[in-house]
C-alpha cells in the first residue's frame, strides 16, 4: 500500500527568512499533525540526517540528504513549497517519489533524469528531480533542482539549459506528465553572489544557510575565501 505524505503551510505569504510552518502527514487514510507549529529557525533536524558539523560531504551526498529529507520530513517539504509559486497548494500536495521509482527503477528516485534539451541537441541532467501531485488524480508540477557547493561553478550553458529542459519534459508520461514546473538553485549565498547572472536564470533560490536549519550538514560544508 502506498503511503501518502501531505505538506501544509500557514496561509500567511511565504517569508524567505523563515516562514511559519505546519506539517501534516496522511498515512493510510489517517491524519496525524505535528506538535506545535515551529518557525524554520526552530525546526528539528531530520532524523538520521543530523550529521556532525565536522564532516565534509560531496555534492551528491548533499543532493541525497536534501531529496530524502523532502520525502521524509513534512516540515522540510512544507518549507520548500513555501518558497515556490505552488505554496498555496502545499496542503494538498503529495510527492510522487514511489511513482518516480516505478517508472525508472534505480537506487535513487530523484537522480539521473536526463533530457535532450531542445535547441541544444545534447542531453543534460537535473541534479534533483521531484514531481508533486495536487490532490489524488489532480494536476502535477515538478521542481528541477540544481545543487552547487561553494567551491563549484556552472558548466558552460548549464544554468541556461534548466528551463528549456523542464519545458521539454512537460506533459510527457515518462516524466510523470507534470503540467507546471519551477527551476531551483540550491547553493550557499556566496555562490549565488559570485555567479549572479547564471543564478538569476533559476526561478527559486534556496540557500545552504536556510536548509541547514533542517539539515545541519548543509551548514558544515566548507566555503572558499
Image (cartoon, helix red, strand yellow):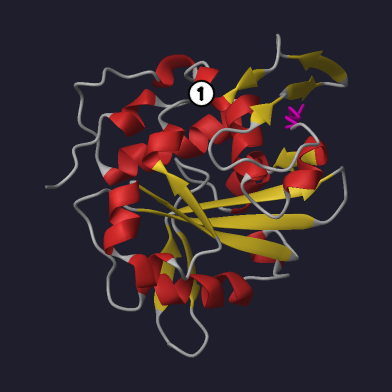
Quadrant hosting residue 177 = bottom right
Task: Tell whether 1 sits left or right of 14.
Answer: right
**Residue found at the far top of this picture:** 35
**Residue 100 appears left or right of 49:** right
Q: Nearer the viewer, residue 147 or 211?
A: 211
The correct choice, above or below, for 29 with respect to 161 in the image is: above
**Would you say residue 6 sits in the magenta stretch?**
yes
The location of residue 115, given as percent across then percent down, is 50, 72
Q: Give the number of callouts.
A: 1
The x, y position of residue 19, in whole percent, is 63, 33
- Among the 4 quarters of the image, the one containing residue 191: bottom left
- Determine which quarter of the picture holds residue 70: top right
Secondary structure, magenta segment, majority class: loop
Most distant residue in the bottom direction: 119
Expressed as whole percent of the image width and height from the top left, the position of residue 83 reads 61, 47
Determine which residue is flagged by label 1: 41
In the figure, 202 relative to 131: above or below? below
Query: Quadrant location of the N terminus?
Result: top right
Range of the magenta residues?
1-8
Q: Residue at x 32, y 37 (%)?
A: 61
SS assignment at label 1: helix
- Decide whether residue 122 is among the magenta residues: no
Q: Residue at x 71, y 57 (%)?
A: 141
- Up the image or down, 45 lies above or below 208; here it is above
**Left of 158 or right of it: where is 86?**
right
Q: Which one is in front, 9 or 73?
A: 9
Amino acid at each position: 500500500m502506498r503511503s501518502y505524505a501531505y505538506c501544509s503551510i500557514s496561509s500567511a505569504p511565504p517569508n524567505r527568512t523563515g516562514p511559519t510552518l505546519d506539517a501534516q502527514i496522511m498515512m493510510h487514510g489517517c491524519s496525524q499533525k505535528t506538535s506545535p507549529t515551529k518557525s524554520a529557525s526552530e525546526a528539528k533536524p531530520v532524523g538520521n540526517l543530523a550529521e556532525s558539523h565536522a564532516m565534509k560531504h560531496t555534492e551528491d551526498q548533499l543532493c541525497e540528504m536534501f531529496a530524502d529529507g523532502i520525502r521524509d520530513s513534512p516540515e522540510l517539504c512544507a518549507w520548500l513549497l513555501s518558497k515556490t509559486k505552488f505554496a498555496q497548494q502545499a496542503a494538498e500536495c503529495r510527492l510522487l517519489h514511489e511513482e518516480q521509482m516505478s517508472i525508472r527503477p534505480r537506487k535513487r528516485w530523484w537522480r539521473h533524469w536526463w533530457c535532450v534539451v531542445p535547441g541544444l541537441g545534447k542531453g543534460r541532467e537535473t541534479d534533483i528531480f521531484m514531481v508533486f501531485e495536487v490532490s489524488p488524480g489532480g494536476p502535477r508540477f515538478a521542481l528541477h533542482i540544481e545543487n552547487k557547493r561553494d567551491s563549484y561553478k556552472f558548466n558552460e550553458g548549464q544554468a541556461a539549459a534548466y528551463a528549456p529542459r523542464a519545458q521539454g519534459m512537460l506533459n510527457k508520461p515518462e516524466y510523470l506528465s507534470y503540467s507546471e514546473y519551477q527551476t531551483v538553485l540550491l547553493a550557499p549565498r556566496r555562490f549565488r553572489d559570485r555567479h549572479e547572472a547564471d543564478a538569476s536564470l533559476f526561478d527559486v533560490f534556496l540557500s545552504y544557510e536556510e536548509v541547514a536549519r533542517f539539515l545541519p550538514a548543509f551548514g558544515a560544508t566548507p566555503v572558499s575565501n
